[in-house]
Amino acid sequence: MKISEEVLKEKDYCISLRRHFHKYPELSLQEYKTAKKIEEELDKLSIKHERVGETGVVGYLYGKKKGKTIGIRADMDALAIEEKTNKEYASLHQGVMHACGHDSHTAALLLVGKLLKDYDFDGEIRLFFQQSEENGQGARQFVQKGLCKDLDRVVAYHAVSDLPIGTVSITPGPQMASCDYFKIEVKGKAAHVSTPHLGIDALSIACQIVTALKSIVSTTINPLDTVIIGVGKMESGTAYNIVADSAMIEGTTRTFSIKTRLQVNGLIKSIANNIASSYGANCHTTIINYANPLINDEDVCRELLLASSKYATRTITDYQRKLGADDFADFLEACKGCYIQVGSSNDIDQETSSAHHNELFDIDERSMLLAASIIIDYVKDYLKN
């Protein structure tokens, strides 16, 4: 693995920022102090910036004249997890932790901005400091603001603990699944359990709906497609001897295909309604889009390979797809781009191998220096063509 000389000179700057963000994590849509810190750093660098929503920030770097426009995204929200790493930079906010590496993404993007600020180029570079990736409400605010309309390329990197330091994935095609949330509310009629014919049993109906949902994948979807329909929560009933008058089901769907996603979500609604109505109950289904399928563009992946080959020990182009989601997919739906995955584990510190969203999660901080080296090299090469 190699780190560029200009990045290596700013190593302490990047690490100190990352540790600051790690100490003071903030949950999705609550990243007020994080956004303020980012703005303070951009002001020090004389980089123009503005808010996106309440807590997102976009910074602008302008070249000598008009040309191509490239966006670089870093997410910055944390998770509701109590940290147990005992590191000197561990979270000072009880019950909140950077357990997914977003602190390093933010620090690396500030470093990228610092090093590209005085670069002689044509066109424009946009630094997207995105709020609320963890609940899929952040990227869409940048898209809705029109910040992607005239983009030629957009890139982002994510630290991944299941790859060793020095390894980078630049894999074309689907990499992360879509994520949709569904809530099914069944309204029946209460009665004493000794007279069930006088009521409409919402609990029994809900159980049948859950069973039917589980059969969608095996009976209706192309077996070559990857689909998950998960039910994680069901609430119903008030007492052991009362027919439940209502029930609520919550779950999620994951797919790698927009077409399959629409099919699955449509089937959930129709199956729930049909089962409920057959027993005389009412049913209301709510589906919320958290993230689109994340699909890397082949051309951008090919362009990035040159920069990655200069710095990474190993570059993977066939990394296994994951059924987790990342709303960077919203940027990729609006513009050609790539989601780069950078290994952040090592053999010395076991916590760097901890799973994401785990109380012991940490990173090898060289991963953000490697990512910054690759992204800076790519941006310079792209904007000079």
Image (cartoon, helix red, strand yellow):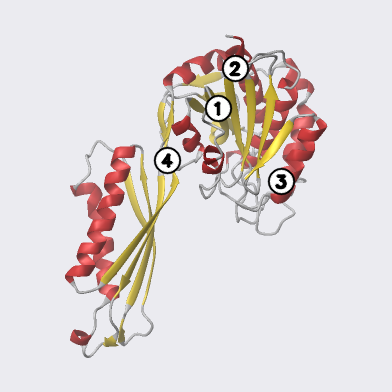
Residue corresponding to mark 3: 34
Task: Report how far apart the C-alphas of labels 2 and 1 lie in the structure.
Answer: 10 Å
Question: Of callouts 2 and 1, which one flags the residue occurring earlier in the amino acid sequence?
Answer: 1
Which amino acid does the dot numbered 3 rest on? Thr
The correct choice, above or below, for 160 with respect to 214 in the image is above
Identify whether 354 is placed above or below 125.
Answer: below
Residue lying at the far right in this picture: please name it: 44
Determine the CA span between mark 2 and mark 3. Answer: 27 Å
Task: Say whether disc 1 or disc 3 marks the residue closer to the N-terminus.
Answer: 3
Q: Which mark is residue 155?
A: 1
Residue 30 seen in the current view: yes
Instruction: Give whichever of 22, 278 is nearer the camera.
Output: 278
Disc 1 residue type (three-letter): Val
Residue corresponding to mark 2: 378
Circle 3: element type: helix
Q: Quadrant of residue 46?
A: top right
Seen at 59% across and 33% down, the residue is 73
Q: Which residue corresponds to mark 4?
A: 292
Q: SS class of the residue under badge 4? A: loop
> Dots 4 and 2: beta carbons under 8 Å?
no
Q: How many C-alpha atoms fall within 10 Å of the one at disc 2: few (<14), some, or many (≥20)?
A: some
**Contact? badges 2 and 1 (CB < 8 Å):** yes
Q: Where is residue 331? Give x, y as percent.
A: 50, 34
SS label for mark 1 = strand
- Write the residue at 67% across / 51% down: 26
Q: CA separation, marks 4 and 1?
A: 16 Å
The amino acid at mark 4 is Asn
Tag 4 or tag 3, which sits nearer the N-term? 3
